Amino acid sequence: MKRTQTQYKQIKPVLPKQRGNVSLSNLQVLNAILYVTEHGCKRRGLPKHFGNWHTIYTRMSRWSKSDALTKVFEHLQKEQLLRILYSTIPMALVL
């Protein structure tokens, strides 16, 4: 469930601003968190292309404490529900 830059723009306002000299963007961290959630692996087991697992853990912990992670997952749930809803509506009703 990797997010693209365009999809990330919808979620970006929910996340805290990045601070300091960061090695990973919020989008990269979000994709790593979604990977862990989807695959059920441990953060230490993340593929190397996601970056340092400790950086991801630290930011995820900060987002969780500030309730930002909950807001992100709520946004993703609403997005998925709308996708399901629109896929079940017959096209004749839409037109």
Image (tube, rainbow, N blue to C red):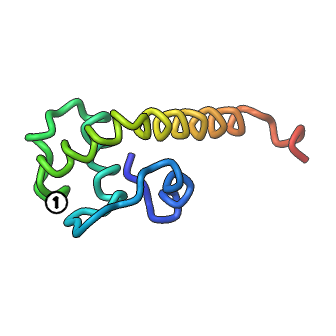
Q: Amino acid at mark 1?
A: His
Question: Badge 1: few (under 14), some or many (20 or more) residues near its Cα, within 10 Å?
Answer: few
Q: Quadrant of the N terminus?
A: top left
Q: Which residue is drawn at the image coordinates 11% and 56% (left, top)?
A: 48
Measuring from the top left, give residue 79's x and y in whole percent: 59, 40
The picture quadrant where one finds residue 17 is bottom left
Q: Which residue is drawn at the image coordinates 36% and 58% (left, top)?
A: 27
Q: Nearer the viewer, residue 36 or 67?
A: 67
Q: Nearer the viewer, residue 39 or 11?
A: 11
Q: Which residue is drawn at the image coordinates 19% and 56% (left, top)?
A: 50
The picture quadrant where one finds residue 49 is bottom left
Looking at the image, residue 15 lies above or below residue 80? below
Measuring from the top left, give residue 18's x and y in whole percent: 34, 61
Q: Nearer the viewer, residue 3 or 63?
A: 63
Looking at the image, residue 29 lies above or below residue 38? below
Looking at the image, residue 62 lies above or below residue 28? above
Measuring from the top left, give residue 95's x and y in whole percent: 91, 47
The picture quadrant where one finds residue 5 is bottom left
Looking at the rendered structure, the number of numbered marks drawn on it comes to: 1
State left or right for residue 91 relative to residue 33.
Answer: right
State left or right for residue 69 relative to residue 53.
Answer: right
State left or right for residue 59 relative to residue 14.
Answer: left
Q: Which residue is drawn at the image coordinates 29% and 41% (left, top)?
A: 62
Q: Nearer the viewer, residue 91 or 81?
A: 81
Identify the residue at the far bottom of this view: 21
The residue pinned by badge 1 equals: 49
Task: Find numbered disc 1 in the image and state the secondary structure of the residue it sits on.
Answer: helix
